[in-house]
Image (cartoon, helix red, strand yellow):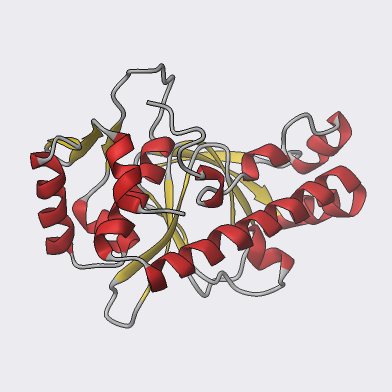
Amino acid sequence: MSIKGLFPIDKWDFKSESIFTDLPANDFELLTAHKSEQVYKKGEVVFREGAYPSGIFYIVDGKVKKYKADKDGKEQIIYVANTGELLGYHAILSEDRYPDSAAVLEESVIAFIPKEDFLDTIHQSDIFTRRLLKTLSHEFAVLANSITMYAQKSVRERLAVQLIVIREKYKVNFEPGMPVEINMSRDDLASIVGTARENVVRMLSEFKEAGIIETKGRKIIVQDVGKLIQIANYK
């Protein structure tokens, strides 16, 4: 089922993949002149909070969680980035350290673009700079929306919202009627929702009994996204 017109997915999903689309050839060549690619294994860290950035990262294929960890190592996932998205550029623009950490949720191919090439492209390309500013503005709106959700919605509503959003990220070659498998640990899902693992497990069981989802091991298949949208109670 498509959620177009039923749920405002753009308010929950970054759109940095549009930055590279149809970028003038000279600008693209400058940006990617010294690009390198690396395969990251599931769980491998891309960068850590507090480190100084030496470049930006582009997800060629895969999924990455952005998170902050407390002094006991407990994670709070801020965002799940998908294929085509940029990571790490905020720290370079602010001339500061990484404000959060990033680690892959599944085996992923990630490109690294040196800081110097990124900054040179900003200085040379008005198109690239405008797109970057537009993306930053959109990301701010997404994060503001997330903060509001944590303050105003119940855990049940937050879980429904996150299942809707994550389902969209796991769509691959999607056709109407096709099942979408969410392959995510219960610990990571609980971290995104902002609750204890046992709460997520209990609510998933309730959703399963109601026919809203199906589970296969750690995989979650949303059977009725319409009911999730109702539970999310988003207005």
141 sits left or right of 82 in the view: right
81 sits left or right of 35 in the view: left
Figure check: 137 above or below 214: below
Estimate the x, y position of residue 52 in percent, counting from the top left. Answer: 60, 70
Q: Quadrant of residue 116?
A: bottom right
Residue shown at the point (31%, 61%) measured from the top left? 193
Of residues 71 and 169, the one drawn nearer to the viewer in this rendering: 169
Estimate the x, y position of residue 117 in percent, counting from the top left. Answer: 78, 50
Of residues 230 and 65, the one drawn nearer to the viewer in this rendering: 230
Q: Does residue 125 appear in this view? A: no
Residue shown at the point (29%, 74%) measured from the top left? 73
Figure check: 188 above or below 25: below
196 sits left or right of 108 in the view: left
Q: Exactly how many numbered labels are in the figure? A: 0
Estimate the x, y position of residue 54 in percent, counting from the top left. Answer: 65, 61
Estimate the x, y position of residue 39 in percent, counting from the top left. Answer: 44, 38
Residue shown at the point (15%, 62%) measured from the top left? 199
Q: Residue furthest bottom?
A: 71
Of residues 176 and 23, the one drawn nearer to the viewer in this rendering: 176
Q: Does residue 50 appear in this view? A: yes
Q: Which quarter shows the N terminus?
A: top left
Residue shown at the point (47%, 69%) measured from the top left? 147
